[in-house]
Image (spheres, rainbow, N blue to C red):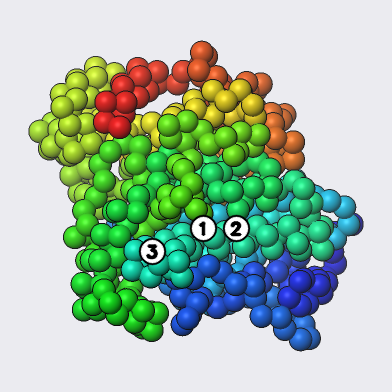
Amino acid sequence: MAYESAPVVETTAGRVRGTMIEGVAAYKSVPYGATTAGANRFMPPRKPEAWLGIREARTYCSRAPQAGLRGPTRPELANFSGATDSAPETEDCLTLNVWTPGAAGKRPVMVWLHGGAFSYGSANSDRQQGSRLCNRGDVVVVTVNHRLNIFAHLHLAELGGAEFARSSNAGVLDLVAALEWVRDNIAQFGGDPGNVTIFGESGGGGKVSTLMTMPMARGLFHKAIIQSGASVILGRPERAAKLAELVLKELGIAAADFRKLQSVPVAQLLAAVAPAQKALGPVHRPLFDRYPFGPVVDGDVLPRDPFSPDASPLSADIPLLIGDMKDEMTSFTATIDRIWDRTLTEAEARDRLFPIAGRQTDRVVETYRRLYPRANAARRFLAATTDSNFRVRSLAVAQRKAAQQQASVWMYSFEWETPLFDGRLGAPHALDVPFTFDTIDLTNATDMSDGARKVAATMAETWIAFARTGNPNNATIPHWPAYNAAERPTLLLDVEPGVVNDLRGEQRALWQEITETTR
C-alpha cells in the first residue's frame, strides 16, 4: 500500500516528516551524524544530536564543502546534467535522503554514493531522485551526503598521533556511519536492513570499492555495484603526509601548530586544495587511485587495497556488478578544442599518451590506428585513454573478483550514444547516472527518444533485479552469464542489449600487459 501522504517516521535521533514526490514518500536531509565543524573537523563521525518534536525533512538543507568542481566543461554543456544542487555548503553535512513507496513489507534497499572524485558533488540533484526506482521496482532508495576533499581525507596521523590517526579516512568513515543508520532505521521506512545494495558512479564507485575492504563496513551491505569508478589501489600514507605538508605550507601554518587547521575558515581551507594538489603532482600508474584527497591504506580503517594484489577476502561473498561507459573520456576532454573539434594531430595525440603508456606509447598508437582505421587521431586518443583510465581498472576488479570463485561478478559496458552535439560525446562519463535512476527527462543529456527511454528502463530494471536477488538477469535483457576469465561475458547496454564475450579483447590484453609492467 503506497502512502497517500508522507507519514511521520521515528528514527533513533527523533521523528521526521517528509513530502510526497511522484507517489513516493521522500525524506530529505535526515541527519545520520553530528556537525563536523570545529573540534569535530578531521575526526571520525559522531552520532547526530537527538531532537524533540518533528523535524521537517521536505527540502534539501546541506551539502559538503566543494573543491575541484569543474563546472560546465563547455558553455553548451552547462545544463547537460540538469539542475545542480543549490543547498548550502556546510560542515553540518552528514545527511541522507530516503525514498520509499510504503511502510509495509521488507523491501530491498539501494544506497547510492554520489560521484565527484572524493572532492565534490552531492546526493541532492534531480538526476539522483529515487522515486522512479521506488515505483518501478518496489525498493527503498537512500542517497548519502558526506565529507569531501580536504575535510574528508587530510592525513594528519604523523602530526597528531592517535587522536588524528583516522583523519585521512574520515570521509569513508562517514559512509560507514550512514550504513549503520540504514541498519538501525531503514525498517521504519519499509526497507530490509538484511538486503542492502551499495551503488555508485565515478568517485561513488571508488567509495563502493573502498567499503568492500573496510572491516567496519562488514555486514552493513550485501551487494555492490561499481559504475565507472573501480578503485584497485588506494592512497599511501607517505604521499598523503606530503600533501598535508603542502597544505600547511600554503596556509602558512607550522607543523607544530597543525591544530589551527580545525579553526581555519572553510573558504580558506578550500583555497589551499588546488595549489597543494598541483605541487604534489599527479599519479600516472594505471591501477593507482587518482585522488589526491582520497582514502589511505592506514593499516586500521583500511588494512589493504580493495583489489590488489587480489580481491579483498573481506567481501568475497558480496555479489558485484561492474562496468564503464564506452566513451568515458569525451567529457573530461571537452574543454580541449582540438579534441572537441577533432583536429588533434597524430603527434599531439602521441604526446598526450606518453605519460600514460611510457615506453609502450608507439605500440598503443599503432594498435589503435589499426583497430580504428577510419577514426581520426582525436577519436583514437579518446578510445585509448578510456581503456587506460577506466576500463582496465574495471577489468582488473572483475577478473580478481571472479578468481575468488565465491560470489559472482557481472560486467557491462554502456554503449548507447547521445546524439546531442553531433554525437561528439558518444557515451561519456556520468551519462549513465540518470539512466540508472530512470530520470533522463530531468536532464538535458539525451534526445528523449524511444531508444533513450528504453535504455533507461533496461538499466533501471537490471539494477533493481540485482539489488533484489544478487543476480541482474531479468526480462529486459538476454541471458547474462557471470564474468569469468575464460569467456569474459559482457552485457552491452544499448537500445537492443546484447552479450558478447571478451569485448574489445585486443585492447583489453594490451592495457593489462602495460598495467602489469608498471605495477
**The quadrant where residue 10 appears:** bottom right
Q: Position of residue 161 (x, y in %)?
A: 40, 67
Q: Which residue is mark 3?
A: 157
Q: Is residue 475 left or right of residue 104?
A: left
Count of numbered circles in the view: 3
Amino acid of disc 2: Val
Q: CA distance from mark 3 to mark 1?
A: 16 Å
Please say if 176 is above or below 512. Answer: below
Q: Residue at x 45, y 21 (%)?
A: 503
Q: Residue at x 48, y 40 (%)?
A: 306
Please say if 394 is above or below 35. Answer: above
Nearer the observer: mark 3 or 1; the answer is: 3
Which of the pair 287/2 is nearer the observer?
A: 287
Q: Position of residue 374 (x, y in %)?
A: 25, 22
Q: Position of residue 11 (x, y in %)?
A: 77, 71
Q: Is residue 207 visible?
A: yes
Q: Which residue is mark 1?
A: 172
Please say if 370 is above or below 114. Answer: above
Tell me which label, 3 or 1, sits earlier in the chain. 3
